[in-house]
Each structure stands twice: as C-alpha cells, then as structure tokens.
Image (tube, rainbow, N blue to C red):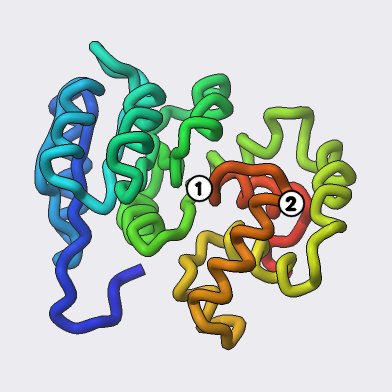
Amino acid sequence: MTPDVAGAAPVRVVVADDEAMIRAGVRAILTTDPTIEVVAEAGDGRAAVELVRAHRPQVVLLDIRMPKLDGLSAAAEIRRLVPQTAAVMLTTFGEDDHIARALGHGASGFLLKAGDPRELIAGVHAVADGGAYLSPRVARRVIELGGGRLARRPAARDRTAALTEREREVLGLVGAGLSNAEIARRLHLVEGTVKTYLTSIFTRLEVRNRVQAAIIAYEAGLVGQ
C-alpha cells in the first residue's frame, strides 16, 4: 500500500541475498516505487544484521539460505537487536521446513523470489505499516504444513472461540494483511484500541507475532468474512 501522506519519508529497506543478481533484481523492482528507498545491500546474514543496526530501516528483506548467518538466524538476531525493523523472508517455493521455522523467528512476512513483483512492493509497505504479509502461494502452503487447511480448521476455530466478536474481526483483518491504522479505519476505532485488541488476541491464542496470528485467521476461515 502506498503511503497516503504527501511528502512522507520513504520506506527504508535493506536487501540481503548471497546472489548479486537477485539483489539487483529486488532493488530494481523496489526502486520503481518512489516511496521506497533501498539503503543498503548485504551478501550474507551477518552483514545484514550489521547493516540493519547501522541504518535502522523499517524493513529488511532476508534470503533464507545465506553464508555466515542464515536468514532465519539473522531475523531472530535483528528482532532482538533492532525490534522496530520488520523482517521479511525471501523464499523459493517448497522450502516448507524453513517457512515453518521462520514463524517462530519473528518474521513479518514471506515473499516468493519468483512471485509477482507487485507482491514485493505490497509486502514492503504492509510490514512497514505494522502489518503482516504472506505471498498468497506461501500462505496456502503454510496453512497446509500441519495436515491441510480443512483438517486444521476445527482446532483453529476452537482456539478463536474464546475471542470476542470484535477480536475475531480484528484477527480476520490481520490475516488479510492490514496494518493497525488500516484496521482502525475499517472498524471505526482509534489505533490504540486496535493495539489493545491485538495484545489480548496474541495472549489468548498464545502466538508471538502477526504472522502466526494471520495463519490462525486463515485456518479458522476468518479472512475475507
């Protein structure tokens, strides 16, 4: 989503991938959007962490397979050292184990390297605004990892049954990738109230971040209601 405030500072991004051509391609796509600025590039996970510490970007795009420090470990370290930076994992389709592990490492999104370039731009804006973003193909794969969406739906519905109707509405919008500000506008709430709802939702569902909450929203059938 493009910022709607004229003259707003661009979203600052660090790109980390051990393949120079991939980094160049990601940079080329992002620079087509004047509201995004690539401030640094890294060829390994350790360099990515150091560049994030130096530049404090809103978003870091991390390849999962990198030398010195893999993307999953880099995401965990960035979450610990620079929690205001949202980590988005760049994946190839089929890296199921890596995708599942990344859910517990604080990742705010998952994008396919071979996906639609528009998803890359949309994902950067979504996580920069405090939302979560799952490439549609990745989202479908993630919710199948434990045995399929239909098989998991009863358990997910049981987990969300304790939520209030309003909390389920908020959870569904988190699953759709909306930021706190967008949820507030959609539900005619103040943003602080949305944050309060999210704190309660995360506690009741026993999840650590928006991506984990979004997966439960998909599994429970709350997205798109």
Q: Name which residue type carries label 1.
A: Leu
Examine the rendered structure and indicate whether residue 111 appears above or below residue 188. Answer: above
Q: Which residue is mark 2?
A: 204
Counting residues from the start of the chain, the first of labels 2 and 1 encountered is: 1
Q: What residue is disc 1 on? A: 134
**Closer to the eye: label 2 or 1:** 2
Mark 2, Cα crowd under 10 Å, few <14 / some 14-19 / many 20+, is few
Residue 195 at x, y percent in the picture: 54, 67
**Residue 52 against residue 199 in the figure, above or below:** above
Residue 134: in sight, yes or no? yes
Report the amino acid beneath label 2: Arg
User: Along the horizontal axis of the image, is 202 left or right of 93?
Assistant: right
Which of these two is toward me, 132 or 29? 132
SS type, badge 2: helix
Q: Residue at x 48, y 69 (%)?
A: 180
Left or right, 153 with respect to 17, comes to right
Q: Quadrant of residue 49?
A: top left
Horizontal side, residue 80 vs residue 140: left or right: left
Q: CA distance from mark 2 to mark 1?
A: 22 Å
